[in-house]
């Protein structure tokens, strides 16, 4: 059971044949909040400076074994650990990152399982959707102030990308140590030298064709099309990025699409796309809420709406309308995460979010959210 809030949005979509047509875009709060099924918009991958300022909070960093992460995911996150997680942890350590305790989450969004921290303070983690469909794998994310940035849909895809990029850069001095660290996982996913043998023009194209789709690579592709003054290809790629089945649950694709629509002065369509993005969890936008709200031409009305929904009066109104108490609790948990993402004030709402999941009957998720070293 997941929060449901449906919005119907008419938007004009640019087609390959440059004809204009009208279409209805349907987005549900439940799809966004696994919310699964929401789609987003694209932007260039923000630089390291946009990651969460680590001087404001720093999880306790210490070496932690891969078996510890596996047990944490089984016993605390209560989900299936990725098969090759221990290989990924070894690869992260090989490239100079510090493996950290999965319980080192003080000041971070409470839906993650931390894996490693690099020298700039950026944390790589797994995302534990609160009400994910059965069988859905844990995405690999980078933790940021306002939420998370999707690195890969799953651990195997991230390992595959890392070993391909290393192989492609061997001419620049790479010695294959990451491939060696990946062990049988790397051997299963990639054969050394395949990129060179493929004669594909560049590593990004190879990854999109042979490994999978990644937000930052799709965004770079759009930027490249603009640099080549190929606006049609840029817009087609940007719209493709927003397909619901590509990055379910993430609002990022629509934010980026809104930005490129704004770039070509299609302001009304940009506004519509940004408003669709804001029906996804705000912590999946890949930017501050205010940036997306500005394109959507919203000031504080959405924030006020959400605050009203989590108030006692708002919850009583929902009960009067016949909404189940468990559903109201799930809605409140989702809304509180949205509000916390605005300033990254996760610690302020963690306990109440856990209470909401208990009220909705998700005791295991509540324990996971509250757990910290």
Image (spheres, grey):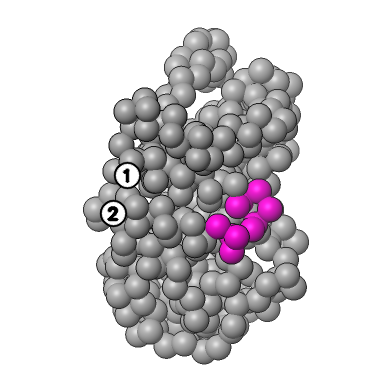
Q: Is residue 347 magenta?
A: yes
Mark 1, other Cα within 10 Å: few <14 / some 14–19 / many ≥20: some
- Check the image and report above or below for 158 versus 226: below
The quarter of the rendered structure image containing the N terminus is top left
Q: Is residue 332 magenta?
A: no
Residue placed farthest to the left in the image?
134
Badge 1 or badge 2: first in the primary sequence: 1
- Check the image and report above or below for 159 versus 231: below
Q: Residue at x 60, y 47 (%)?
A: 339
Main SS class of the magenta portion in the image: helix
Number of dots carrying numbers: 2
Between residue 310 and residue 333, name the one nearer to us: 310
Pointer 1 and pointer 2: residues touching (CB < 8 Å)? yes
Between residue 87 and residue 51, name the one nearer to us: 51
The image shows residue 146 at horizontal and vertical percentages of 63, 54
Q: Residue at x 41, y 31 (%)?
A: 318
Disc number at residue 16? Answer: none
Between residue 262 and residue 179, name the one nearer to us: 262
Q: Residue at x 70, y 20 (%)?
A: 267
- Residue tagged 1: 326
> Which quadrant of the figure has residue 303?
top right
Relative to 138, 1 lies left or right? left
Q: Which residues are magenta?
A: 340-349
Whether residue 210 is visible here, answered yes or no, is: no
- Residue tagged 2: 361
Relative to 23, 260 lies left or right? right
- Check the image and report above or below for 76 versus 213: below
Q: CA distance from mark 1 to mark 2?
A: 7 Å
Q: Residue at x 72, y 58 (%)?
A: 50
The image shows residue 147 at horizontal and vertical percentages of 58, 55
Relative to 99, 226 lies left or right? right
The image shows residue 37 at horizontal and vertical percentages of 39, 39
């Amino acid at each position: 059971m997941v929060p449901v809030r449906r919005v119907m949005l008419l938007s004009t979509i640019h087609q390959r044949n440059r004809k204009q047509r009208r279409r209805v875009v349907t987005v549900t709060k439940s799809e966004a909040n696994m919310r699964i099924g929401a789609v987003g918009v694209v932007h260039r991958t923000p630089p390291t400076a946009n990651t969460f300022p680590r001087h404001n909070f720093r999880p306790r960093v210490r070496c932690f074994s891969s078996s510890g992460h596996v047990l944490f995911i089984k016993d605390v996150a209560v989900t299936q650990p990725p098969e090759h997680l221990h290989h990924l942890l070894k690869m992260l350590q090989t490239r100079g990152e510090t493996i950290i305790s999965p319980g080192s989450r003080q000041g971070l969004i409470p839906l993650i399982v931390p894996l490693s921290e690099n020298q700039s303070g950026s944390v790589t983690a797994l995302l534990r959707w609160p009400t994910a469909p059965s069988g859905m794998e844990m995405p690999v994310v980078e933790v940021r102030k306002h939420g998370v940035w999707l690195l890969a849909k799953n651990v195997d895809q991230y390992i595959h990308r890392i070993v391909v990029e290393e192989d492609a850069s061997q001419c620049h001095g790479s010695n294959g140590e990451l491939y060696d660290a990946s062990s049988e996982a790397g051997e299963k996913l990639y054969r050394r030298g395949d990129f060179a043998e493929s004669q594909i023009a560049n590593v990004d194209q190879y990854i999109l064709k042979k490994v999978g789709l990644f937000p930052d690579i799709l965004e770079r592709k759009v930027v490249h099309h603009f640099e080549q003054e190929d606006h049609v290809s840029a817009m087609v790629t940007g719209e493709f990025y927003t397909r619901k089945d590509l990055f379910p649950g993430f609002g990022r694709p629509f934010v980026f699409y809104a930005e490129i629509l704004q770039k070509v002065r299609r302001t009304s369509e940009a506004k519509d796309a940004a408003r669709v993005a804001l029906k996804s969890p705000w912590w999946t936008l890949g930017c501050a809420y205010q940036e997306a709200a500005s394109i959507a031409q919203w000031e504080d009305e959405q924030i006020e709406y959400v605050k009203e929904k989590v108030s006692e009066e708002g919850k009583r109104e929902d009960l009067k309308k016949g909404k189940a108490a468990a559903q109201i609790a799930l809605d409140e948990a989702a809304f509180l995460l949205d509000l916390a993402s605005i300033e990254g004030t996760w610690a302020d709402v963690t306990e109440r979010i856990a209470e909401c999941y208990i009220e909705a009957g998700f005791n295991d998720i509540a324990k996971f959210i509250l757990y910290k070293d």
